[in-house]
Amino acid sequence: MKKSLILLAALIFSTNSAFAFFWQEDTIDTEGKGYLGTLPNLTKEYEPAEPSESAPIFDRTKQFHSANELRPIPRDDAAFVNIILKPDKTSPYINDLNEFILILEKIYDSIENREDVQKFAAKVYFFKKHADYFRDKYANKPESFFISYQKLLELSLRANTVSALRTEAEKYKPYLAYSGSGKVYNSENIDRQLEYLKNEIESVIVVLKEAE
């Protein structure tokens, strides 16, 4: 009987020890330590994809800058000329003066090259018609007080007088050679008047070019 009691006590003791061990394992303080188990190796199953190389918009940079790819400037396009190239801001008065410069240069060359009376008279007549229109255009405007305006009209009168004198000399000199009036139409006087006119043309061209 005594032996049986000893065995029973030993059995109870061993059972309590095992129970206490497992209870201690289950009650370990894990607060604030996170998950203590084993995680799977995710890097094995999910490998990062290799970056793909994006295709360029143009096959070659050289092609983009190639002369064959460039369009010519549309100079006949009014919108392009007015907006991109910007129209000339020069005033109408200056534009008119620039036209007179070309006209006067032709008269100057006519005198310099000793052109015949008909060609000289035609160039002077063309100048007079433009000067008459110019006078009426700016007669009641501030431009009429400009020195360029006044000099241009004075030169027109002077050129027309010399042209008339030369035309009359060509017409009447055979009949006036022996009269007092014949001196006005002789070649020396005509040449002298042409030289004066040429000098005046030079001076007026300078005035026109300096006008603003």
Image: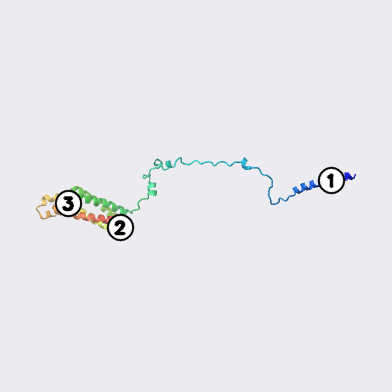
x and y percentages locating residue 165 in the rendered image: 17, 53
Q: Quadrant of the C terminus?
A: bottom left
Residue 42 visible (yes or no): yes
Residue at (62% x, 41% y) in the render: 44
Q: Check disc 1 and give the amino acid type.
A: Ala
Does residue 178 appear left or right of residue 4 in this picture? left
Q: Quadrant of the N terminus?
A: top right
Q: Nearer the viewer, residue 174 or 5?
A: 5
How many residues crowd around disc 2 within 10 Å: few (fewer than 14), some, or many (20 or more)? some
Does residue 193 appear left or right of residue 78 in this picture? left
Residue 185 visible (yes or no): no
State the residue position of label 3: 166
Give the residue at the far front of this rendering. Answer: 3
How many residues crowd around disc 3 within 10 Å: few (fewer than 14), some, or many (20 or more)? many
Helix, strand or loop status at disc 1: helix
How far apart in space, not on screen, are marks 1 and 3 (Cα)? 161 Å
Q: Quadrant of residue 3?
A: top right
Q: Quadrant of residue 141?
A: bottom left
State the residue position of label 1: 10
How far apart in space, not on screen, are marks 2 and 1 (Cα)? 136 Å
Q: Check disc 2 and give the amino acid type.
A: Glu
State the residue position of label 2: 143
